[in-house]
Every structure is written in structure tokens, then in C-alpha cells.
Amino acid sequence: MATAIYPGSFDPVTLGHLDIIERTAQIMDRVIVGVLNNRKKTPLFSVEERVNMLKSVTSHLENVEVKAFDGLTIDFARENGAKVIVRGLRAITDFEYELQLSQTNRVMAPEIDTLFLTTSLKYSYLSSSMVKEIAVYGGDISAFLPAQIARLVQEKVKSLDKKG
């Protein structure tokens, strides 16, 4: 059984992320979406909230699982028996960073390959940080996120406004 992981922070999960997950699910037998607990970032949503959001939007995909992790991606891949790490590419700037990362991973874990999928053209500009910034300033984010996720982002931003 060919297993791939698709790691990321997914804060929040966008339509671009979902596109990569759905396309990977067509290629691979098993896909594990790894929600990174990145200690360097201050996320809008907790790891548990992001896992739950991803489970909600991928529930139609029988071969997709969602798990939280911290630490090295290659360790997460090994723990889950994955031989492939999937990465989405939006632009050439993504490629330079992702190539460096995949080459480093390959040195550390030669048994694990990286599969690059280019995002669909309609999502090539899209990032979670851009969506959060639009939401903070009250803009319409409905074109960028699954509907239920857009509602959660708007609620979270409103609750943060009230606190501070």
C-alpha cells in the first residue's frame, strides 16, 4: 500500500490545500494529512481545531487520515510508514524553498521521496496567511475556504477582537 503524508500548518485549511489533498488521494492508496504543531508560529487555531477542520473537509475521502505531529517531517513519515512526502507548489519562490527542503530530507531519509504537485491555477496565489489578513480586516474570505471553515475563521477573528 503506497502511503503519502501531506504536512503543513493548515491555519486555516484553504481550497488550495483541499485541492492538493483530493488530487493526492487519487494517486496514493493512503494519505495522511499531518498538522504541524510549529512552535515558531503563533497560529490562529489550535492543533486540535485544525485537525478537526481538516477531518471535516476531507470526510468524503475514504483513504485520507488527519493526524497532528511535531518534530521532523521525515520522522512523522517514518512513524506512519510513508515513502512519499507531498508538497504543493504555487510559484517559483515555493519551488526554491521546497527543493532545498526535499534535498535535505533526502539526505536524512533516503528511503523517502518528495512529490511536488502544482496547485490548480485558480489557487496559485492563495495562502493561509493572506486569508487570515483579509479576515482580520473584515474582508470576504468565502472564495478562499470551504464554507464551514470560512465561518470558523470569521468567528475566531471576532472573538479575538473582543479580547483585545
Image: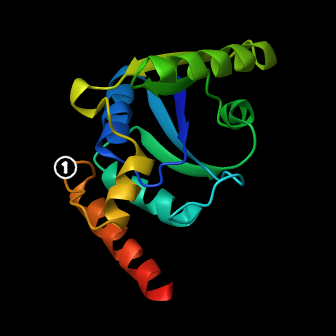
Question: Considering only vertical position in the picture, is 151 above or below 70?
Answer: below
The residue carrying pointer 1 sits among few (fewer than 14), some (14 to 19) or many (20 or more) residues within 10 Å by Cα, namely few
The location of residue 47, given as percent across then percent down, is 57, 61
Q: Quadrant of residue 111?
A: top right
Which residue is pictured at 40% across the width and 59% down the height?
53
Where residue 21 appears, as percent x and y from the top left, is 38, 35
Q: In this view, does 69 lie above or below 140?
A: above
Q: Nearer the viewer, residue 84 or 122?
A: 122
> Residue visible at 46% across and 79% down?
160
Please name whichever residue, 19 or 59, is drawn nearer the observer in this view of the structure: 19
For the question of whether residue 1 can be seen, the reply is no
Q: Which structural element holds mark 1?
A: loop
Closer to the camera in the image, 152 or 96: 96
Q: Nearer the viewer, residue 118 or 62?
A: 118
Residue depicted at x 76% and y 18%: 109
Task: Quickly name the residue at label 1.
Answer: 143
- What's under tag 1, amino acid-wise? Ala
For the question of whether residue 73 can be seen, the reply is yes
Q: Residue 137, located in which quarter of the rendered image?
A: bottom left
